[in-house]
Image (spheres, grey):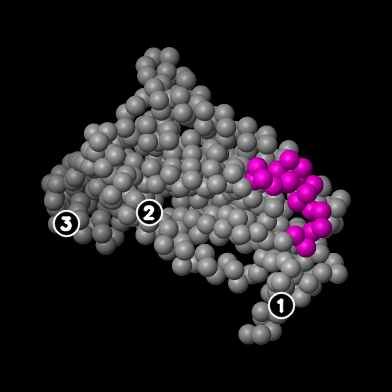
Amino acid sequence: MAGILAWFWNERFWLPHNVTWADLKNTDEATFPQAEDLYLALPLSFCIFMIRLVFERFIARPCALGLKIQANGPQKAQPNAILEKVFTAITKHPDEKRLEGLSKQLDWDVRTIQRWFRQRRNQEKPSTLTRFCESMWRFTFYLYIFTYGVRFLKKTSWIWNTRECWYNYPYQPLTVDLHYYYIVELSFYLSLLFSQFTDIRRKDFLVMVIHHMATISLITFSYVNNMARVGTLVMCLHDAADILLEAAKMANYAKCQRLCNFIFVMFSLVFISSRLGVYPVWILNTTLFESWEIVGPYPSWWVFNFLLLLLQVLHSFWSYLIVKIACRAISKGKSGKWNPLHVSKDDRSDIESSSDEEEVPRPSLKLHSSTTTNGTNGTNGTNGYLTGSPCSDEH
């Protein structure tokens, strides 16, 4: 075991040349990031998850009811023991051959059986009230952490000059505010990763899992080898759009259509400009070029930048979805109401009932990664370094 740990924490991988772990031990004069600091994120992520449950039950739910959002879910399928057994034990999506067999067995026509399975699948989906509560929780967290990030960063030197992220690297002391920022962000994205398996299952489930894993990896990588300064820039950059996405979704659930449309337009502008403009010009420029010039590359530097580039690929994918949704909404708006969140349902929703409203994609990204809706999770976003996903109900 000791050999495996020694191999994993090899200084030649994690640190620049001529730097050792002993050089980054805490002293009376300075405190540096330590890998064991991140253990705190595990119990804290559980606490955040429990806070979420309390928040949704005692704050978000009353707000939703005050907005007259109903708790009614999709129409329930009529009880049928035979079909229920097939649904739970064999398949939720019977093929044509099985449908014909059930049709003969029950003396029902195939279309009726297909409708039963569709209603039964939708029956497991949460109500609009539940979705509103999820979005309100994410909105509240993103608003809080973004506000904290802005207040923290405006007092730093590296937000004005990104080269400050690399001067005297890696001997940059860890402040209490920076440590708090990192641990809370990491804990939140760990809680989002856990909740992917308990929340609404979206079509972009795998994409969001990858997104959160990349975010968590980025936070961990950047903290362990003390790239925390640039990490704070990535996290703060991604939180801004996540706030707007969750706000648009809440307006959509509350049937405030004009407000929803306005916020979605603002979200689209902020997401695309920050992910396809500011991120590559500001973040990737400093991690790829300024750091190369000032510090020079080393193995974990390559891994770190690979994850950041992977994040940029996700940004491009989500931006494509947003533009696609907006174009479709504008096209349909010529003959009726313009609702980008509703129009996006064909691409992202797992709800098959035409009467059930779906949500918009969701971007979340932090250096570390909320979810948009099913096809578009929280954000989630990211969330994280990697927080942002317009495709998820995460952010």
**Nearer the observer, 276 or 23:** 23
Residue 373's x, y, as percent? 43, 42
Which tag is nearer the camera, tag 2 or tag 1? 2
Q: Are marks 3 and 2 in contact (CB under 8 Å)?
A: no
Q: Which residue is mark 3?
A: 82
Q: Residue at x 64, y 50 (%)?
A: 232
In the image, 156: left or right of 53?
A: right
Q: CA distance from mark 3 to mark 2?
A: 38 Å
At numbered mark 3, what does the secondary structure look like: helix, strand or loop?
Answer: helix
Pair 1/3: label in front? 1
Expressed as whole percent of the image width and height from the top left, the position of residue 393 reads 43, 44
Q: Amino acid at mark 1?
A: Trp
Q: Position of residue 48 (x, y in %)?
A: 42, 58
> Magenta stretch: residue 23 in it?
no
| Closer to the camera in the image, 285 or 158 | 158
Task: Tell me if 49 is positioned left or right of 288 in this view.
Answer: left
Question: Magenta region: which residues?
Answer: 153-172
- Report the side of 258 relative to 305 (left or right): left
Q: Is residue 165 magenta?
A: yes
Q: Which mark is residue 7?
A: 1
The disc labelled 3 sits on which kind of residue?
A: Ile
Which residue extends farthest front? Answer: 28
Cα distance in 3D space between marks 2 and 1: 38 Å
Determine which of the numbered discs, if any, sits on residue 52 in the image.
2
Amino acid type assigned to the residue bearing label 2 in the image: Arg
Sequence-wise, the earlier of marks 2 and 1 is: 1
Instruction: Say whether marks 1 and 3 touch (CB < 8 Å).
Output: no
User: Which residue is found at the position 73% from the left and 40% from the top?
Assistant: 160
Which numbered disc flags the more N-terminal residue, 3 or 2? 2
Q: Nearer the viewer, mark 3 or mark 2?
A: 2
If the image is split into quadrants, where does the N terminus sit? bottom right
The spot of residue 229 in percent (x, y) is: 69, 53
